[in-house]
């Protein structure tokens, strides 16, 4: 087939999932590409509360992009992750943070104001029971027809794959965490 035989979609749903590294990094690449095309982007982050490199980067570029970039950090830290869990946050506080963050994501995705809405770590929030699969499906299906949606995090629900246009499973081949090494600043966060 020649390129002229292909069509273009007004918007797409992109999923970056799997146990391997690179899901958030891929979404940040998508952010850069979208802003470079003069798109309006909302970057809504679930789970992550601690300072990570993307927070500093986005904070630094916000003045440049003004109303074309919304950044919302709504997490309270790891939930149900053993000794890595946020120890001073109750399950109810985690759930409320996820619901509040979902509200921001839903408003951005359905408003028609953004070309791209990135929901970083939303799949984890669903897998951990902080949000439901029904809420994730509603976010996907209720989004504005011209708004693309990117969903990241481990364990994207397989039964929702039919709603994705692009899905990538980041498969871990090797990671130094398995050898008891913590994440590296600038590489992992």
Image (tube, grey):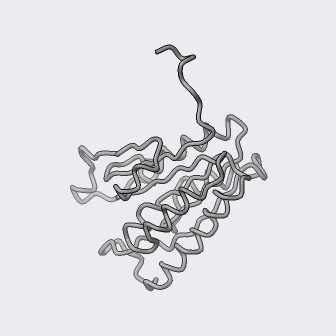
The vertical placement of 153 against 15, above or below, is below
Kindly give the residue lying farthest to the left in the view shown.
179
Count the marks: how many? 0
Instruction: Give the image quarter of residue 87.
Output: bottom left
x 55%, y 56%: residue: 141
The vertical placement of 100 against 61, above or below, is below
Question: Where is residue 143 shown, x and y percent of the image?
Answer: 61, 55
Question: Where is residue 108 shown, x and y percent of the image?
Answer: 67, 59
x 52%, y 58%: residue: 52
Query: Could you say which is closer to the camera, residue 19 or residue 187?
Result: 19
Question: Where is residue 15 shown, x and y percent of the image?
Answer: 45, 48
The answer to whether one can see residue 178 in this image is yes
Kindly give the residue lying farthest to the front in the view shown.
5
Kindly give the residue lying farthest to the top in the view shown.
2
The answer to whether one can see residue 154 in this image is no
x 41%, y 64%: residue: 124
Query: Could you say which is closer to the camera, residue 135 or residue 64?
Result: 135
* Left or right position of 83 against 45: left
x 53%, y 63%: residue: 138
Question: Where is residue 39 shown, x and y percent of the image?
Answer: 70, 41
* Left or right position of 31 against 18: right
Query: Could you say which is closer to the camera, residue 114 or residue 187?
Result: 114
């Amino acid at each position: 087939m020649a390129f002229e035989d292909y069509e273009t979609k007004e918007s797409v749903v992109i999923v970056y999932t799997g146990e391997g590294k690179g899901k958030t990094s891929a979404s940040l690449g998508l952010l850069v590409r979208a802003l470079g095309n003069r798109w309006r982007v909302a970057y809504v982050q679930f789970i992550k509360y601690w300072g990570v490199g993307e927070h500093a980067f986005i904070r630094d570029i916000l003045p440049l992009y003004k109303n074309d970039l919304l950044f919302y950090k709504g997490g309270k830290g790891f939930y149900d992750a053993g000794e890595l869990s946020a120890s001073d946050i109750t399950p109810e506080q985690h759930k409320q943070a996820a619901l509040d963050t979902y509200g921001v994501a839903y408003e951005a995705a359905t408003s028609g104001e953004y070309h791209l809405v990135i929901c970083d770590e939303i799949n984890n929030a669903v897998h951990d029971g902080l949000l439901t699969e029904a809420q994730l499906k509603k976010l996907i299906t209720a989004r504005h027809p011209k708004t693309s949606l990117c969903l990241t995090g481990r364990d994207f629900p397989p039964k929702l794959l039919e709603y994705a246009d692009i899905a990538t499973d980041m498969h871990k081949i090797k990671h130094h965490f398995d050898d008891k090494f913590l994440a590296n600043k600038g590489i992992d966060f």
